Image (tube, coloured by chain):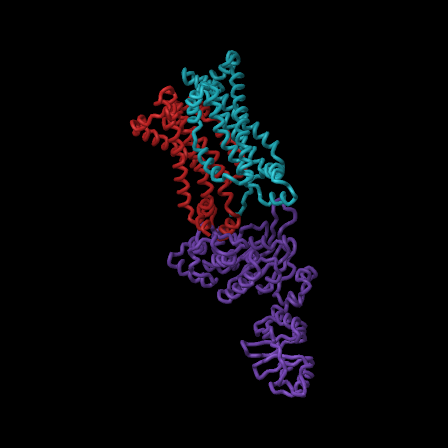
Chain colours: A red, B purple, C cyan
Amino acid sequence: MILAFFSWEWVFDHLDDIWDRTMEHLLLTVIAVFFGFLISFGLSITVLRNRRLFAPITAFTGVLYTIPSLALFALLVPITGLSVLTAEIGLISYTLLILVRNTVAGIDGVPMPVLEAAAGMGYTRRQLLWRVQLPLALPVIIAGVRIAAVTTIGLVTVTALIGQGGLGFFILRGLSLLFSPVGTTQIVVGVVLSVVLALVVDLALVGTQRALTPWAKAKEAV
Amino acid sequence: MIELIDVSKSFPGGGSPAVENLSLEIKDGEIVVLVGPSGCGKTTTLKMINRLIEPTSGTITISGEPVDTVPAHQLRRRIGYVIQQVGLFPHKTVGENIATVPELLGWSDGDIEARLNQLADAVQLEPEFLDRYPSELSGGQQQRVGVARALAADPPILLMDEPFAAVDPIVRAHLQDELLALQDRVHKTMVIVTHDIEEAIKLGDRIAILSDGGQLEQYAPPNEILREPANLFVANFLGTDRGIKRLSLIPVSAIELDRGPVVARGASEAETLEAMAAYGTDWFAVGQGTELDGWAPAADVGPDGVHEVRLEPFRTRLTPDSTLKDALDAVVSSHTSVAAIFNGDEFLGMVTADAIRDEILR
Amino acid sequence: MIEFLGEVVAWFLDPAHWTGANGIPNRVWEHVQITVAATSVAALLAILPAIVLGHRKQGGTLVVGAVNLFRAVPSFGIVVLALPITIGLGLGIGFWPTFLALLFLAIPPMFINSYTGVAGVDPDLIEAARGVGMTDAQCLLGVEVPAASPIIIAAVRVAAVQVVATATLGAIVGWGGLGRYIIDGFAIQDDVMVFAGALLVAGLALVTEGLMSAVERWLVPKGLQTAGNEVARIAV
């Protein structure tokens, strides 16, 4: 039934537009995940140095995560206006919970004998973190980044409601032109491309993880 | 020399101290084994030497210098450390694992590479394993890599915490032999923790027997401990087969061998009976010089002498390097009640139960 | 800023905002209603087949695919996309597109978790159950489902919170609920209404999370509740 309303003509006429919006969408995502990762990394190291902070930090990032995206953006608007900043603050907030949780879990997951041997051989605390714990925690950390990235891509569509773009623009536009094929087409394009973009980014991150952890492959092969 | 002076360790909320006022000195180049029941503080003591655990009181010195005068990580780079589960870095190749401390110390690539080959040879690891990842190696191989890794920067001291407990007995025996052979070449000061008294006896130049709270019950060479346990605790810990354990320390070559009731190939009945009477046996053996053909019961010899007698071969053949414990086993489980000693195919002599007992009682 | 917050407080204190179809109580009620409805229906649709499939260990690849796909789908897009569908089906705007979209979003987490929870039950447990003479069905209901219950209940919690959040967007396709304040506020540029609505939505979401966590703790057998993280302690 939808397909009856789908206009390939519109799609081909607007390929440039579609590309631009997709790139916009990707950019918003990358910024959010990048800064989200930096902040989460800092929070994770803090937690690892001081375990008692884990509960409050998890609670705080958990609250941010639970607040529905539209509400969070709406709460920020009076402070930072209808801007990219508002969108990014909101998007970054959503990544924190999963990134902190996975980073801490990943580092905690490094086997005790490895840590003991490394300390016993004379690694300093910093060397232990960067040369042993982080490389071994990488798979779990990247798994967190994947989830954060895919979730963010979905949330970027909502930012269309506060004047930002990305593929959400097509969804909103399609809504206003609802009773025409052009409208339905735009909604579908928005949704489908959002999913495709998410899957592509997910795959790219999986590839990155494989490339960064050659030892995991050796284990699989055996 | 490593010296522990009145060292104590109490853990917060832990009740009685894990180690209380322990004093111990370990000479350069000797292997000292810390042994005792679970919870006696032996591992805690070991870890205080490289400051993975800091003592609550007391001092530890290495070559006269207290261990807390340098930052902990610097201290540890000069001490080799091997643990039970090895703890190889999964994300590094075997070669990179072994090269850990040299890299931390800033060795050149060339030096590191040469050292890697040297070590692989020393611990009997094939060179192609250097590029593999730890997950591709067997348990025994991983242990060898662990030892190589500890030795990489040529530290004068090696600390080992139950290093061979996680492998099966056959591999364990091999690794123990290899460690002793290695020590002959490198002469490190080694401190080894184990709960296995047999391992302690096999490896240790001196054994420190610890009881609860790190109490030093006895500190002496294995032979001395086995012969004269200091108290009931030590005696119980050594087990009721103390005497036999001592035997595993003495090689066959240490005692005088008997020729035994061996007669020539064409011997007569009379000569055979005389030989058996001389040794008090109910069997005889036939041989010429260093060739031993076999044995037979007294009843088999007849008027024709030994000429046509069917001989049983001596099934267990020990060497001068075999231990008296092996000899005792052969004595107890053979019809002849002796252990036949050979050098290759050359017959050297026989060991009897009496000879063994004489040695224990000496 | 202070002024603005003062206006928001005034908005909450205005009795007019507490009565009628657009009053806070009604909107909250609508929101809660649709959440309960969507979560329950989705649970029925998702959990039962998932448990059976998980028990039989069939359809594993489907589940993996579903996991990836589910996370990638934008909830906003689904809500809007539901609109032409419901219109085409003659169901109109407002409730039905919102409800269908919520179903679509609530089913995957409950399906995935029920499947992996049951499929991942320790094989030793199942062997023991069979060994004692349990039938297939008895094993499933008596051993596997209880063993998987923490994961399943966690999924219901996650789904419920997700539904509360997404129901906010229902206002875009003509439905009510607390999102109404935000969307209407944007439309007439009434910042105060937007903010107040956002506070209400955030509040409800947090309350739901808290409530569901308590329910989770109450329902999950004590022996299965997850312990805290173990911490590595080395004197480096």
Provide residue C203's location: percent of width, then percent of height.
52, 23
B259 is higher (above) or lower (below) than B18: below
Residue placed most toward the observer, B27 or B37:
B37
Q: Residue at x 54, y 24 (%)?
A: C36
Provide residue C51's location: percent of width, then percent of height.
55, 36
Q: Quadrant of residue B204?
A: bottom right
Q: Quadrant of residue A168?
A: top left
Provide residue C222's location: percent of width, then percent of height.
63, 36
> Can residue A206 be seen here?
yes
C155 is higher (above) or lower (below) than B260: above
Residue placed most toward the observer, B88 or C171:
C171
B151 is higher (above) or lower (below) than C201: below
Residue placed most toward the observer, A60 or B85:
B85
Residue placed most toward the observer, B328 or A76:
B328
> Can residue C1 be seen here?
no
Provide residue B63's location: percent of width, then percent of height.
52, 60
For the image, the number of numbered tags is 0
Quadrant location of the N terminus of chain C in the rendered image: top left
Q: Is residue A151 left or right of residue B256?
A: left
